[in-house]
Image (spheres, grey):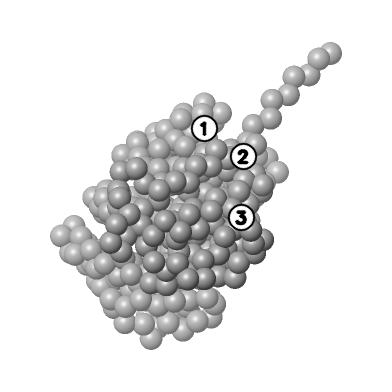
């Protein structure tokens, strides 16, 4: 192919490799970035129903949705760079809730978000449909996390109910919060503060974890005992803990029981690879062995950079053995193991 770049000879190639470097740097220094998607049911400003709004400043949210309705957005913007809001039409029963949130999902199918979260309590049926939506999105190549809270404020009083919800919503890319926070003297249920957790996750770099992150709150709405906390973690629940001196996230977990950090790494890597190839390769090079070798080399170098930062290891990048790269299609097999974070320190005191 004309103008083919050989990464074994050249040290830096403008274009694909630089694009990879930019994306990796963004993922590794993600503080103050990240996008959260929130459907908003109540709004009294200039906003109209069934419309998408991109919000980066709380004062803009107030003008659009009314000062009394923007708490979910305010929580998310404490860490996220942007909130994408979809204004939900009014519904009064399960059937119309389904119709309203079907429109939400269609709207977010064409938006980029790191995390999707409800700012209010929704039904268990709607939560289940969100899991189904997440599966479809993954099949279509879109990677994001969905955050859940209680379906009713009373659920937070019993961690066993929250744990049962975690088991029902079991998924590698979903998070279920089972208790809320007291902030400035106000009690917020798990579904109220789920946007705060969503913003925190969206802004967490691939080489960091939300485990034991300190939260700006006076207390939790439900303190769990040691045994309840262990049970909750085994169930894949996200627990907020009063340590005695601060309020913290007990451990970053998905409802699948795996580390949330691993999901964030996988999502970030897949987004980076797809974005870089789409912008720098698709439609610009022949679908031949030279291009395949070039892309494989660049992907490997990108992953090796993340490996050097302690994000992952065990890198494998090859042409797909299952799908042939013929016509206008190229298929890669990319494999790696996410590096775990240090989350437990065991101390033995000898006297």
Q: Position of residue 59 (x, y in %)?
A: 53, 80
Disc tally is 3
Q: Label 1: how many residues lie within 10 Å, few (<14), some (14-19) or many (20+)? A: some
Numbered disc 2: secondary structure: loop
Query: Cβ–Cβ below 8 Å for labels 3 and 1?
Result: no
| Disc assigned to residue 161 | none
Q: Label 3: how many residues lie within 10 Å, few (<14), some (14-19) or many (20+)? A: few
Visible in this render: residue 331?
Answer: yes
Numbered disc 3: secondary structure: loop
| Disc assigned to residue 8 | 3
Q: Which residue is tagged 2?
A: 341
Which of labels 3 and 2 is toward the front? 3
Numbered disc 1: secondary structure: helix
Quadrant placement of the N terminus: bottom left
Q: At 78% from the left edge and 19% from the top edge, which residue is drawn? A: 349
| Left or right relative to 98: residue 67 | right
Q: Quadrant of residue 102?
A: bottom left
Q: Position of residue 118 (x, y in %)?
A: 38, 59
Q: Position of residue 101 (x, y in %)?
A: 26, 63
Q: At 60% from the left edge and 66% from the top edge, which residue is drawn? A: 13
Residue sitting at the far front: 2
């Amino acid at each position: 192919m004309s103008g083919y770049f050989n990464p074994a000879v050249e040290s830096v190639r403008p274009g694909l490799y630089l694009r990879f470097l930019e994306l990796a740097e963004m993922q590794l220094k993600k503080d103050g970035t990240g996008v959260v998607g929130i459907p908003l049911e109540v709004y009294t400003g200039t906003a109209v129903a069934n419309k998408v709004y991109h919000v980066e400043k709380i004062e803009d949210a107030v003008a659009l949705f009314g000062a009394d309705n923007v708490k979910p957005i305010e929580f998310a913007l404490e860490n996220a760079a942007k909130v994408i809001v979809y204004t939900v039409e009014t519904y009064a029963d399960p059937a119309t809730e389904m119709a309203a949130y079907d429109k939400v999902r269609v709207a977010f199918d064409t938006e980029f978000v790191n995390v999707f979260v409800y700012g209010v309590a929704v039904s268990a049926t709607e939560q289940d449909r969100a899991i189904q939506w997440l599966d479809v999105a993954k099949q279509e190549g879109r990677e994001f996390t969905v955050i859940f809270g209680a379906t009713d404020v009373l659920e937070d009083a019993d961690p066993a109910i929250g744990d049962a919800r975690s088991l029902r919503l079991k998924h590698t890319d979903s998070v279920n919060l089972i208790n809320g926070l007291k902030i400035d003297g106000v009690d917020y249920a798990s579904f109220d503060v789920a946007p705060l957790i969503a913003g925190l996750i969206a802004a967490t770099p691939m080489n960091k974890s939300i485990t034991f992150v300190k939260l700006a709150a006076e207390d939790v709405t439900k303190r769990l005992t040691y045994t309840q906390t262990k049970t909750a973690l085994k169930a894949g629940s996200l627990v907020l803990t009063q340590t005695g001196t601060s309020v913290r996230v007990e451990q970053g977990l998905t409802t699948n029981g795996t580390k949330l950090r691993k999901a964030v790494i996988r999502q970030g890597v897949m987004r980076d690879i797809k974005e870089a190839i789409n912008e720098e390769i698709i439609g610009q090079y022949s679908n031949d062995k030279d291009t395949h070798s070039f892309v494989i080399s660049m992907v490997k170098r990108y992953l090796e950079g993340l490996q050097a930062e302690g994000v992952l290891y065990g890198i494998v990048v090859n042409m797909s053995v299952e799908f042939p790269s013929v016509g206008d299609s190229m298929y890669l097999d990319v494999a790696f193991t996410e590096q775990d974070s240090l989350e437990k320190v065991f101390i033995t005191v000898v006297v």
